Image (cartoon, helix red, strand yellow):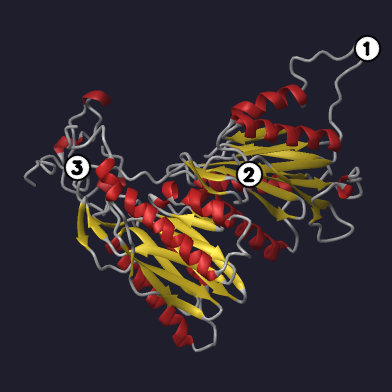
């Protein structure tokens, strides 16, 4: 007798051993149809590298280069990784660019939905971050993550906002945040300049600081590009700059000895 | 691919968990409880932020400290607070501490097969006015204790508490016995020393310290109000009193 009601009325499967004839370790293997059936995005393909962001006197500033890599191939060199959401928020993403585009579509839909209510309310940076972190956490809980690290920045009601969310749903807020390689290379420079001095840091200083960090990253991060954009959010709203070119000098490379291709 | 990199399908398992470091600690006195946690959040060798609270006020007399995977911790606290709000709407009073403890156990066990990777310590005042600490494992096993440390520096702090709170390996002076409960000033000194020591020896502990103190109704805060960097959080003058005490920890 098969005591499992879910098996009643179904075709018998002799491989299933319904009577427990064999000891557990000898039971014939049954094939699970779905073992390999459902496959999810489980590695990033076309990726963006670091995003940097800082708080400054009048608001927040965020920078990301224009490269989307395909593994080690610099595949798309004109991709914008900063995205305006609503009237007082900007997001910047590293990680999988197709997942990021899905997130842009999703957020734009939410902003439109809120607008059509016509109640005079719209989403500020805190709301966008809360929403995004719920989406990211729920996707990781379904073991089907959106493979990104995202910075959310904004300025609303005289208050700066800067926070992080990633594919695990981990969130935090700080005066300066960087994703990817930026967390190792740019964060020491940013913290030294920003921590405890947010209210003194002018827009020009902030812009120069991010420019320097983007240059250091371009020198050291092999998946980066010398072309980037800066987003500024302050009392006058969101502004995403045109592409900025990094001036670099490689003449020092001539003098390096001891490794590499040259023989002496 | 010509380089054969796709010859064998490449499998990379997505790991839905991470460890965000930090340490929490709670000690129960006769008529008060102290619940503390550092404010550093880290992943691997990187400090993500120097201020991410791990200790949360639940009711006028209950405080919850969470440690482990920060995303799970924040979600868990959010859900506990929501359940407590529903209880308040249904019963027009705050849920008692022992009931919150049982609630937390069932909420954790409900996720037995995809656990919240979080160590919880609940502290506060019981209905009989005594200080109480409940500690939990990630799947809901729990017990009431006099003190408990959890998190990255548990292995550094708990033995110290065993010695200083439970008087393990200490002999009382001739003709005397160890006190059952310590006064608040002694407990606060032990808590602060625990965290400064853990900060010295553990890389994931530091930056800031938040200490919540809950004092039973009608009992003296024993001079706590006059300490520096203290803020009172009590909502009613005639109920239990709650304070938060902030201290800096080394940031290296």
Compared with B154, B5 (above or below) is below
Q: Is residue A46 visible?
A: yes
Q: CA distance from mark 1 to mark 3?
A: 71 Å
The answer to whether residue A8 is left or right of residue A118 is: left
Q: Is residue A23 visible?
A: no
- In primary-sequence order, the first of circles 1 and 3 is 3
Q: Can you give x and y, in whole percent of width and height, for residue B61 in the image? A: 77, 51
Q: Nearer the viewer, residue B107 or B229?
A: B229
The chain carrying label 3 is B
Residue beneath label 3, please? B10
Q: Dot 2: within a 10 Å radius of its alpha carbon, few (fewer than 14), some, or many (20 or more) residues?
A: many
Residue at 30% in and 40% down? A3
Depth check, mark 1 against mark 2: the one in front is: 2
Label 1 SS = loop
- In primary-sequence order, the first of circles 3 and 2 is 3
Residue at 62% in and 48% down? B54
Counting labels gives: 3
């Amino acid at each position: 007798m098969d005591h499992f009601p879910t098996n009643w009325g179904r075709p018998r499967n002799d491989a299933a051993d319904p009577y427990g004839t064999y000891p557990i370790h000898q039971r014939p293997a049954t094939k699970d149809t779905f073992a390999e059936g459902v496959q999810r995005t489980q590695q990033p393909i076309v990726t963006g590298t670091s995003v940097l962001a800082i708080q400054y006197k009048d608001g927040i500033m965020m920078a990301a280069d224009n490269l989307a890599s395909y593994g080690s191939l610099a595949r798309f060199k004109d991709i914008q990784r900063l995205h305006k959401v609503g009237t007082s928020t900007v997001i910047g993403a590293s990680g999988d660019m197709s997942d990021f585009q899905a997130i842009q579509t999703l957020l734009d839909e939410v902003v439109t939905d809120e607008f059509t209510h016509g109640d005079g309310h719209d989403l500020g940076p805190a709301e966008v971050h809360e929403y995004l972190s719920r989406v990211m956490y729920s996707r990781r809980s379904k073991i089907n993550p959106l493979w990104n690290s995202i910075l959310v920045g904004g300025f609303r009601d005289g208050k700066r906002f800067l926070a992080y969310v990633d594919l695990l749903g981990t969130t935090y807020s700080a005066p300066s945040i960087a994703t990817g390689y930026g967390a190792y290379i740019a964060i020491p420079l940013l913290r030294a300049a920003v921590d405890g001095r947010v209210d003194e840091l002018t827009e020009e200083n902030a812009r120069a600081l991010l420019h320097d960090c983007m240059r250091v990253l371009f020198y050291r991060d092999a998946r980066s590009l010398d072309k980037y954009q800066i987003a500024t959010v302050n009392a006058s709203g969101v502004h995403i700059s045109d592409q900025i070119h990094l001036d670099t000098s490689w003449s020092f490379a001539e003098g390096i000895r001891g490794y590499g291709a040259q023989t002496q | 691919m010509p380089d054969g990199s796709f010859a064998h399908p490449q499998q990379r398992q997505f790991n839905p968990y991470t460890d965000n470091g930090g340490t929490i600690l709670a000690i129960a006195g006769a008529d008060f409880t102290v619940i503390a946690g550092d404010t550093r959040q880290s992943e691997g060798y990187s400090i993500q932020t120097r201020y991410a609270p791990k200790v949360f006020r639940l009711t006028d007399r209950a405080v919850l400290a969470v440690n482990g995977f920060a995303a799970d911790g924040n979600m868990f606290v959010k859900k506990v607070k929501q359940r407590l709000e529903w209880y308040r709407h249904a019963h027009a009073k705050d849920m008692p501490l022992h009931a919150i403890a049982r609630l937390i156990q069932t909420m954790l066990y409900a996720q037995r097969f995809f656990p919240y990777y979080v160590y919880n310590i609940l502290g506060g005042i019981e209905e009989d006015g005594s200080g109480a600490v409940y500690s939990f494992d990630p799947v809901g096993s729990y017990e009431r204790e006099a003190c408990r440390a959890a998190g990255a520096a548990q292995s550094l702090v708990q033995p110290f508490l065993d010695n200083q709170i439970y008087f393990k390996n200490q002999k009382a002076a001739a003709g005397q016995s160890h006190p059952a409960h310590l006064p608040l000033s002694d407990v606060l000194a032990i808590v602060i020393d625990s965290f400064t020591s853990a900060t010295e020896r553990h890389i994931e502990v530091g930056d800031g310290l938040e200490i919540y103190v809950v004092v039973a109704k009608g009992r003296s805060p024993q001079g706590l109000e006059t300490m520096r960097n203290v803020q009172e959080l009590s909502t009613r003058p005639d109920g239990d009193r709650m304070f938060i005490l902030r201290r800096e920890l080394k940031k290296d």
